[in-house]
């Protein structure tokens, strides 16, 4: 009986009289961003002991909390150890979601998890039902600790011989959490500012580990839970899990090949076979909202930049540490187009038919994200004389919370930085969720206006 009550509740029921779940999450992220901003403004946060301007700190805090990776100053060069720890905390909160962490702490403290908390958890990680929230929260935190811990150990073993014990361990921890949360922040500026992982182009230990963490963090907590319960039994996976896994694998394989074809006479010239593979594979993995790069992004061909922008716009999967319109949204829309071309009734895949609500939400998400990205591109170009391709790349990176850049971030003026900040914020909480946060839920009216057909196409 209790399960039925949970499942029958409205998706956006009100926590209090004037605050919905969506608004609560939006306000929560805003609070984290502002707290991080003021802490980064402290002199102790900067390497030179000077207080950073408010807008620079706001941009950095938003980028960290929204796990984006765009920066106006090199992380290692600008921020002290205290500042780096602050960034890592914001990345972890932004990646897992403060709701998941809060519920886990409640579990540890043996506090009762009520309907309100379960509803927030459902909204935060995009689960398909409200039942089993406590178990899911526990698995999310434990799984995160295992993956980030394993990644930190592997990376530390690689970095310690190069940087020494303490610094090697810290680099391992920082980059493991940053990769798993799809944040893209790095500390490699000691060698060359904004170089990211270019010094490890063919290093299979570093690039392989970072790639694995990005993929695992980006497939989504719902998929984790399904894989944990059903192991390798693909036939019995949820439809959501099947779509996410197939779409993710297809995007990785196709984009790896395309990057090779477009860069074989460019940045791949002079590389060994293994270096070419890791350069192409990582270039296919990291745009999925991770933000690292092991080749010079600005040196890519126009075709590769466009492919990267598309991947950044798509992003990861629902209920994950990644952003973008999500893999399931892309799959649903492509299946819908395929269904209409074949003139079949309903959208079917893996022996199941998709609900019409999923199709409507996918179309809405694509339209809102595309509108935000194009509007931001136009606004920035109106107020700044910058190359269109670089601005387009930047806005795709921001709305998809990817963090890759051709280097134009540091050239943005105050207005343009505010635009990018808003895009990163919308990209993290979800464009549709952001829109819903400012609208009231309405019931279907008893009387509707007469319908009339129009010509489409």
Image (spheres, rainbow, N blue to C red):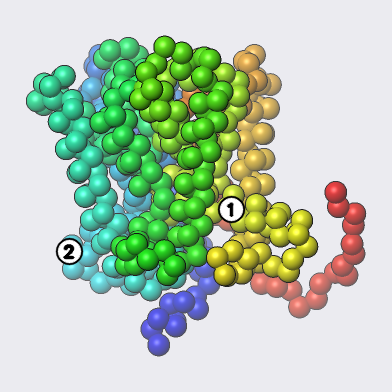
Q: Is residue 113 visible?
A: yes
Question: Would you place residue 126 above or below residue 133 in this image?
Answer: above
Local packing at callout 1 (Cα closer than 10 Å; few below 14, some 14-19, many 20+) is some
Question: Is 268 on the left or on the right of 361, as rendered?
Answer: left
* Residue 228 placement: quadrant: bottom left
Q: Which residue is mark 2?
A: 109
SS for dot 2: loop
Tell which of 48 and 360 is nearer to you: 360
Viewer-closest of 53 and 221: 221
Q: How many marks?
A: 2
Q: Is residue 86 above or below residue 347?
A: above
Q: Answer yes or no: is residue 87 visible.
A: no
Q: Where residue 20 sits in the image (x, y, percent)?
A: 49, 62
Question: Which residue of the protein is positioned furthest toward the left in this rendering?
Answer: 165
Numbered circle sitting on residue 131: none
Query: What residue sits right under mark 1 in the picture?
Result: 331
Q: Secondary structure at mark 1?
A: helix
Please tell me which residue is depicted at 37% across the width and 32% down the height of the picture.
Answer: 184
């Amino acid at each position: 009986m209790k399960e039925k009550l949970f499942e029958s509740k409205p998706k956006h029921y009100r926590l209090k009289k004037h605050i919905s779940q969506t608004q609560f999450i939006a306000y929560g992220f805003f609070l984290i961003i502002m707290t991080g901003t003021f802490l980064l403004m402290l002199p102790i946060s900067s390497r030179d002991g000077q207080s950073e301007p408010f807008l620079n700190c706001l941009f950095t805090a938003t980028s960290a909390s929204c796990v984006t990776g765009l920066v106006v100053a090199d992380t290692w060069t600008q921020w002290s150890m205290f500042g780096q720890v602050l960034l890592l905390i914001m990345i972890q909160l932004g990646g897992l979601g403060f709701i998941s962490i809060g519920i886990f702490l409640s579990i540890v403290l043996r506090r009762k998890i009520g309907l309100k908390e379960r509803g927030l958890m459902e909204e935060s990680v995009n689960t398909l039902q409200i039942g089993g929230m406590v178990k899911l929260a526990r698995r999310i935190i434990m799984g995160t600790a295992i993956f980030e811990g394993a990644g930190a150990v592997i990376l530390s073993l690689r970095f310690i011989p190069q940087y020494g014990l303490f610094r090697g361990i810290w680099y391992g921890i920082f980059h493991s959490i940053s990769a798993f949360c799809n944040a893209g922040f790095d500390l490699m500026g000691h060698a060359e500012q904004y170089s990211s992982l270019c010094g490890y182009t063919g290093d299979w230990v570093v690039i392989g580990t970072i790639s694995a963490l990005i993929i695992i963090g980006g497939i989504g907590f719902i998929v984790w839970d399904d894989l944990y319960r059903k192991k390798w039994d693909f036939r019995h996976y949820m439809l959501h899990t099947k779509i996410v896994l197939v779409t993710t694998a297809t995007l990785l394989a196709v984009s790896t090949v395309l990057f090779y074809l477009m860069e074989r006479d460019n940045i791949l010239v002079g590389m060994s076979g293994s270096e070419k593979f890791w350069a192409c594979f990582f270039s296919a993995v990291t745009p999925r909202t991770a933000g690292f790069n092991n080749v010079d992004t600005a040196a890519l061909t126009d075709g590769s930049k466009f492919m990267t922008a598309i991947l950044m716009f798509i992003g990861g999967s629902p209920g994950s540490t990644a952003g973008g319109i999500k893999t399931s949204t892309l799959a649903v829309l492509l299946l819908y187009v395929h269904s209409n071309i074949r003139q079949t009734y309903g959208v079917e895949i893996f022996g199941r038919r998709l609900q019409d609500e999923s199709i409507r939400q996918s179309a809405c998400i694509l339209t809102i994200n595309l509108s935000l990205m194009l509007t931001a591109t136009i606004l920035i170009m109106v107020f700044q004389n910058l190359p269109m391709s670089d601005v387009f790349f930047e806005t795709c990176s921001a709305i998809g919370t990817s963090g890759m850049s051709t280097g134009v971030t540091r050239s943005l003026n105050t207005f343009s930085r505010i635009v990018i900040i808003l895009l990163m914020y919308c990209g993290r909480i979800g464009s549709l969720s952001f829109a819903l946060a400012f609208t009231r839920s309405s019931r279907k009216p008893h009387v509707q206006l007469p319908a009339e057909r129009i010509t489409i196409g």
